[in-house]
Amino acid sequence: MSLSAALNTVPSPHDAGIAEAAALSGRLTYLCMCLTLCWGVLAAAGWVRRFSGQDALRTGHVVLAAFTLATGTLHGLTFLFLDDFRDDDSFGFADLLLPFYDGTTRHALGIVGFELVVAVSVTAGLRRGAREGRWLRFHQLGYPAIGLLAAHAWLGAVWSGHLAVVWLAGITLLVPPVVLSALRVLPASALVRAGLIAPVPDADTLRVDVDSHLCHSYGVCQSEAPQVFRLGHNGRLEYEKRPEARLTPHVRAAARACPMRAIHLVGAIR
């Protein structure tokens, strides 16, 4: 029996309760997912520190991501406890792990999105071993993954007939992550005009200063401006304090991408 067929027919109180648990865990996953994306963008862009002055609040992103994974896992596992599924020998974990295994598009979107989020979470913990920002590039797959999960949630609401119920709450939760994600990729000049980041000094007076206490030598800056930032053989960061004017856009990108906000751009001291 397919997942869709089982959910269309809930003959027993047991299955009705499991279906309610699946719906509740799915909505909690959607909530945690939106909050995780919002907090992640705010932390990565340095806005958490700008508004609160506390770098420790960056750990909120990790906590929210953990809740997202936990509730998402629970959402998937609930279907294994439906009586209709247990009585059908053809159903197994493959239905929850392999996209398009049951031929349903919305389930495939949810499976692909969730597995991408799991992969991003695992590799984020291994970022110290990566070089030249490769871990960060992979981490950015979290954006399309959340898009797939959002599509899965909305298609599920349409199919179950609950769209009218969750429309207002769903849109309310989805708008902030979409707006923040758009701000994340806007040019620096637009963010400066909006007052979200401080203006960068003129190119001919630019000086680079790296806080050695904050720098963890992840190598993200090297991937953005390899002519200015270099990780030595001992793992320590080396950099040009007064880069050429033509390298200013790359230096600005490196400062924005630094996960620890350790790169400061200031006016040159004559």
Image (spheres, rainbow, N blue to C red):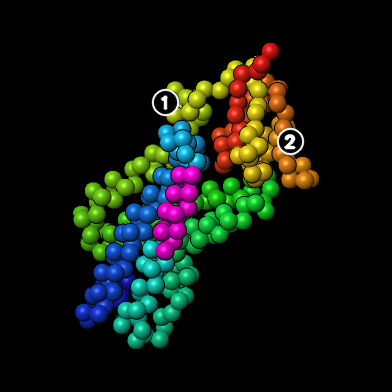
Q: Amino acid at mark 2?
A: Glu
Camera-side mark, 1 or 2: 2
Q: Where is residue 80 drawn, in percent x and y? A: 38, 77
Residue stretch in magenta: 56-70
Q: Where is residue 76 drawn, in percent x and y? A: 39, 69
Q: Main secondary structure of the magenta part?
A: helix
Q: Which of 256/137 is in front? A: 256
**In the image, is 8 to the left or to the right of 1?**
left
Tell me, yes or no, whether the highlighted magenta stretch contains residue 194. no
Q: Which residue is at 70% across, 26% downward?
A: 241
Residue bearing mark 2: 238
Q: Where is residue 48 drawn, in percent x and y? A: 45, 38
Count of numbered marks: 2
- In this view, which residue lies farthest toward the top? 270
Question: Taking 115 as reference, is 248 above or below it?
Answer: above
Task: First in sequence, mark 1 or 2: give its number.
Answer: 1
Q: Which mark is residue 194?
A: 1
Question: Taking 259 as reference, is 13 above or below it?
Answer: below
Q: Which mark is residue 84?
A: none
Q: Which residue is at 70% across, 35% downward?
A: 229
**In the image, is 32 to the left or to the right of 16?**
right
